[in-house]
Amino acid sequence: MKRILSICIALILLFSAFPEAAFAAVSESHVLEADRVLIYNPLPFKEKSNTLFTGTLSSKQNEDLTPGEPLFTAGMHETGKDCSTGKKEPDSRDFWVCTDLSSYQYDKCTFRLAAEGEHCRIWTRENDTSAFTEEQALAMLGQFETVIYPCERANFGPFRALGDGKLEIVTYAMNSNSVCGFFDRYDLYTREEIETIDPDDADSYNCLPIINVNARMAAHDTVVYGTLAHEFQHLILQSAALASPANAGRLGSERSIGAWLNEGFSMAAEEFCYPGSVAEQGYPDAFANSDKIRTGLSYQNFDATASDVGAYGQSFLFTEYLKAQCGDTVFRDVLEYWRGADALSDLTEAKAVKTRLSDETILALDALCTYTAQVEDALGSEEEILLSKLGLAFRIAILLHETDGLFAIGAVRASVPVYSGSGRWLEGGGALCVEAGGSFSIPADADAGLVFVGIRDGAVTGIHTVPEPEEGYYLITVQYGGAWYAMSPSPDENAMLAAVPLTLKTDGSIDVSRAARCIFRADRTADGFRFTCDTPAGVFTLSRTGVNAQTLSISEQADAFRWSHFSDGSDRLQADGYYGRAILYGSYQKGFGYFPSGFFENASFAKPVLIRTEILRGDANMDGKITAADAAIVLRTLVDLAYMNEPMRKAADLDGDGEITAADAAMLLRIVVQIDS
């Protein structure tokens, strides 16, 4: 043993003069044969969170959108003035109506009865030059009594009857030419309930089932009738929420179906009453031409503006897909489920929709693709996972236009706008369609959990889910200024993290010279992953717990660094005392910047890429080969002349006893001189 030891010490002087060689970094790639590729974020939609990066796709385009005016949203109102006439005729009465849609100001105004039927009354405002004529009011009455009421009663169910049980249709000129009408859910509360919800202004609520119609649309019969059908469904749906035993004790904050599905139901109501009317109004075309849809609007995010109504088209197409998969009774059945739910936890769209899916469809959705463990954890239940996969199948169905099976969407068709940007953060439930030109490589910087679907000749050619990191060893790298860098766990003299340059070799692999000490070990935790790299100063730890939740620290310097995620989707790795001078930085561009020493907030941005590294047993210095230099570094470490991190120690532990000793160095030398294999 002494003889071998003396040989190794002599070799230290020889090999310490040589530069460190490169070691191989391995990164798996996946290719889809496709003309178009659908990129889908399976996470649930949450405002400004649950975003995943598609990876770098192609050339940059201008993605700045100019939002239009928001559509009217019913809610608690501001009490305005009393505009009533005081003296009432036998066929007139006062209603509180929204005279200012921008501030939700309600004024008390006098209306006269224009028409009355078995199930509704139609009122027009006194002295309103835009008021419906008697002939128009009678035509509206006829449409409601003979078409809208029986159709929606059959397909959606009953509404909450207050007063004498008739629907009040109140028409007046609104201060908007883009809002055709609305339903305010607060009109559906009884007087006693309103006095509990808003006691100070209780007298300014109607406490009657009311639909408000913009009299400026009086000349447009199709619009008026469609508006009645649309808003009547909203009223029926809110009635179901109020009737649910699960909502007892939640006065004013009842859990109802989300706006994305609620609006889809109302578009479906228009289509039931007037087949073909939704397409005639251009909503599928609005979907096809929407910048919001083009750039990945979630199907669960009802984000519509006066200048971009693509969200209406998307919600309508989703309900068309539901009809194709579940039958025409799906809407009534979902609302019946809502009316009968006893537990608040049961009031979810996912649970309601699952009750209508056939076993065959559920099996097909389960087999559609495999989600990562983190995505399934974020979704939280079998029903939510199923709804997420239903959203993916819906996206595929829009592209394929099949007539039966999982990708059937019905008679209404719409084209999908193509995205041509360089990459994008997708919100939960969001999707992009990109041109592939025959072949598409999954971007190396695509976030784990994203689903890529290849489409060619009207068929799916493959579905690939970007996997989470496997337990093993990785470099955390970025491409910056045309070069590659690895994140070093060793702070410099300014307590900043230094950049370790890498080189791209001619064969496409990465030369990671001098990066052996930057290798992180990935371990799965109960709710995510932990990346660790030990250094002489302590253990450097990057933890990911759940979706978009990350912390970074050196164990013996508890908060030396922190990787923070913000509500706007940005990230920052910050060193205390150097705010904004961190090696990784997220901006409102929602990318990452890699800042070697001397670069600050105005540097360009890049996305970190995990590169899997294979550990060659015996390669103690991580240069990609086994030589006497590996024995030398083992011996230098034993006498505290060198430091080996955990991956290096794993490679050097040839006898597998969990310790690094001179015996391992001896075995290495025997391999070098080919005594052992």
Image: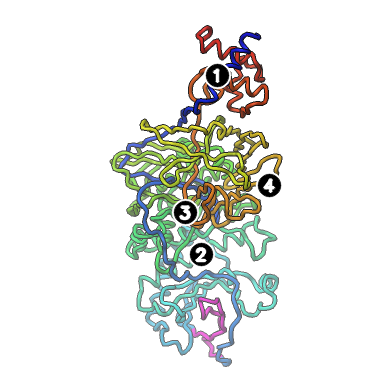
- Separation of marks 4 and 1 at Cα, in angstroms: 35 Å
Labels 1 and 3: the sequence-earlier one: 3
Mark 1: which secondary structure? Answer: loop
What is the span of residues highlighted in magenta in the rendered image?
Answer: 88-112
In the rendered image, residue 336, in percent from the top left (x then y), is placed at 55, 54
> Residue 618 shows which numbered tag?
1
Provide the major secondary structure of the magenta segment. Answer: strand
Residue 199, placed above or below residue 623: below
In the rendered image, residue 352, in percent from the top left (x then y), is placed at 54, 50
Labels 2 and 3: the sequence-earlier one: 2
- Separation of marks 2 and 4 at Cα, in angstroms: 51 Å
Q: State the residue in front, 28 or 167.
A: 28
Label 4: how many Cα within 10 Å (few below 14, some 14–19, many 20+):
some
- The residue indicated by pointer 2 is 234
Which amino acid does the dot numbered 2 rest on?
Answer: His
Label 2: how many Cα within 10 Å (few below 14, some 14–19, many 20+):
many
> Residue 559 shows which numbered tag?
4
- Separation of marks 4 and 3 at Cα, in angstroms: 36 Å
Q: Is residue 656 left or right of residue 356?
A: right
Labels 2 and 1: the sequence-earlier one: 2
Q: Is residue 103 in the magenta section?
A: yes
Labels 4 and 1: the sequence-earlier one: 4
Label 1: how many Cα within 10 Å (few below 14, some 14–19, many 20+):
many
Q: Is residue 23 left or right of residue 374?
A: left
Which amino acid does the dot numbered 3 rest on?
Answer: Ser
Mark 4: which secondary structure? Answer: loop
Whether residue 325 is visible: no
- The residue indicated by pointer 3 is 298
Q: Nearer the viewer, mark 2 or mark 4?
A: 4
Label 3: how many Cα within 10 Å (few below 14, some 14–19, many 20+):
many
- Separation of marks 1 and 3 at Cα, in angstroms: 50 Å
